[in-house]
Image (cartoon, rainbow, N blue to C red):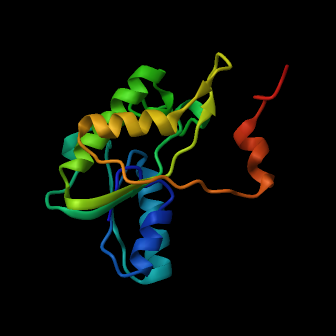
Amino acid sequence: VLDPFSGSGAWALAATINGFQFHGIELRPDVAVASREMVERHCGVAPAIVQGDASDAASYPSGLFDAVLTCPPYGPLEIYSDDPKDLSTLPHEEFLMSIQMVLQHTLIRVYEGAFAVWVVGNWIGADGTYVDFRGELIRLAKAVGWKFHDDVVLVGKLGTAGQRVGNSWRR
């Protein structure tokens, strides 16, 4: 399993518990270490989570993977760091170009017929307009050669709706 936006290590933990080898890429070195240690505490084995930039080909390991599982930044919805390579800090068009680069890097690192699962959400832009990240991701993935198979809508508890919606229903 390959995760170009490894973050807290949720996919690393799930993959390791289920017996899969995992390789994650995380921009923030402290988060990469913490994720690796968390999985090792729970599973007794440390997954390969490296500090790197998902939009840089040099951050990826050699070899092929069976699947890509990831949860990329949702644009500027949550700023993760002040690192200029952090996708959450980029203007929208640069953000999309970086996501497309990650899609290219992951496509050439999976077996033919492999699946990619990208957990994404849409958001309200700084100018108050709706950003259809799901639709943009599908368009970018198709442009680099991924074949769109299906999408899934996750219905969560309303307790998080305020965080996700914010002030989007203002007059």
63 and 53: which is toward the camera: 63
Task: Specify the quadrant that holds the C terminus.
Answer: top right
Give the image quarter of residue 136: top left
Q: Is residue 58 above or below residue 15?
A: above
- Tell me the quarter of the image containing the N terminus: bottom left
Front-most of 12 and 134? 134
Residue 110 horizontal side relative to residue 45, left or right: left
Can you give x and y, in whole percent of width and height, for residue 76 in the image?
56, 30
Kindly identify the residue that appears in the image at 40 percent across and 29 percent down. 96
**Residue that sits furthest to the right in the current view:** 171
Residue nearer the viewer, 149 or 160? 149
- What residue is shown at x 24% (from left), y 37% (from top)? 144
Asked where in the image residue 32 lies, by quadrant, the reply is bottom left
Q: Is residue 29 above or below residue 10?
A: above
Q: What is the x, y in percent for residue 37? A: 45, 69
Q: Is residue 81 left or right of residue 145?
A: right
Q: Quadrant of residue 167?
A: top right
Q: In the image, residue 147 lies at what x, y percent?
A: 29, 48
* Total marks in image: 0
- What residue sits 23% from the left and 44% below the top? 105
Which residue, as the protein is rendered here, is positioned at the far front? 149
* Residue furthest top in the image: 127
